[in-house]
Amino acid sequence: MAFINPQYLVETAWVAAHLNDPALRILDCTVLFASDANGVRVATGHDAWAKGHIPGSGYADLMQDLSDRNSSVPFMMPSMTQFAEAMSRYGIEDGTPVVLYDACSDLWAHMWAARVWWMLRVCGFENAAVLNGGWHKWTLEARPVSTEPSPYPPAHFVARPHPELMADKREVLATMGDSRACLLNALTTEDHAGTVVRYKRAGHIPSSVNVPTVALINPVTHAYLPAAQLRAQFEAVGALSRERVITYCGGGIAASSDAFVLTLLGVPNVAVYDGSLSEWAADPALPMETA
């Protein structure tokens, strides 16, 4: 069984063969983070990128350039203007082929790259792909590494908004219990059950089901699992038979990886709940459940 939309996932061998393509743009989207009983701590991946990256690649700064600077909730989708300005600085415009990767060192691989991929789609840009296995697989295969700065000249990115690809808490609240829709939690089974608490309250949004992002990844290569295995996971929770799927997590990042895979599988009506539990769990008026 193959992906319905394979154009959104690119292999390391293809990227290695196209490193000298002057039209290609490669972006490292890494944000470094640690998660424990005290919550989630994040830090820019820029310094790690400077110490070694795929040759020619630039750094996409999710913490500054690609998050709403006016929001109290971290990593919220920025304005179209802010996003377009950043992509223009990164050398991306209509027709530019883009490859996105991140350097997560565990099974959270791809989620930062998938987040940027999803935001590009929200802005009407469809010519981007996620590098399968990311930096982990690239270095595992001993492919070339560089410390040189990105050579990409500025471009002119034009945003064409697709707001239906993002959900807010009002839509999520209205969707709870609606048999036509699927609320999908991308956090771990422990997060979903409420046995660990990383946000303001334990558990998950009522009526939501759970397909953890970490379960989508090969533990050795960090590449996504084969299409048939991925399809089986989402089919088991009913996500493939609903009119609309809304993915969420802690802050819209892991949720983007689930949304990305659903798009690979051909699910047409998928949205990411941007605020996710960072917003939802902080509001005591909104319901949560455990187990």
Image: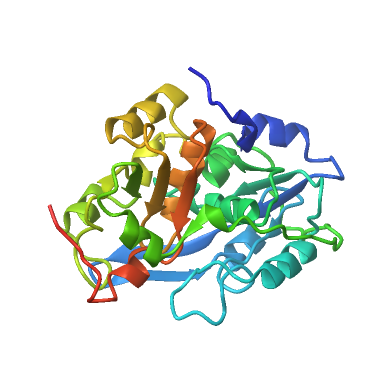
Residue shown at the point (63%, 60%) measured from the top left: 49
Q: Quadrant of residue 48?
A: bottom right
Where is residue 275 drawn, in percent x and y? 42, 67
Where is residue 5 drawn, in percent x and y? 59, 30
Where is residue 22 drawn, in percent x and y? 87, 45
Outermost residue on the top side: it is: 1
Total marks in image: 0
On the rendered structure, is 79 left or right of 98? left
As displayed, is residue 124 above or below residue 20?
Answer: below
Frontmost residue, 270 versus 178: 178
Residue shown at the point (52%, 37%) measured from the top left: 268
Q: Is residue 102 visible?
A: no
Frontmost residue, 107 versus 201: 201
As displayed, is residue 152 above or below residue 265?
Answer: below
Q: Quadrant of residue 50?
A: bottom right
On the rendered structure, is 207 left or right of 113? left
Residue shown at the point (65%, 32%) measured from the top left: 7
Q: Is residue 271 visible?
A: yes
Residue shown at the point (41%, 45%) measured from the top left: 245
Where is residue 102 drawn, in percent x and y? 56, 52
On the rendered structure, is 288 left or right of 2? left
On the rendered structure, is 115 left or right of 36? right
Q: Quadrant of residue 84?
A: bottom right
As displayed, is residue 261 above or below residue 115?
Answer: above
Give the colour scheme of this rendering: rainbow
Frontmost residue, 10 versus 243: 243
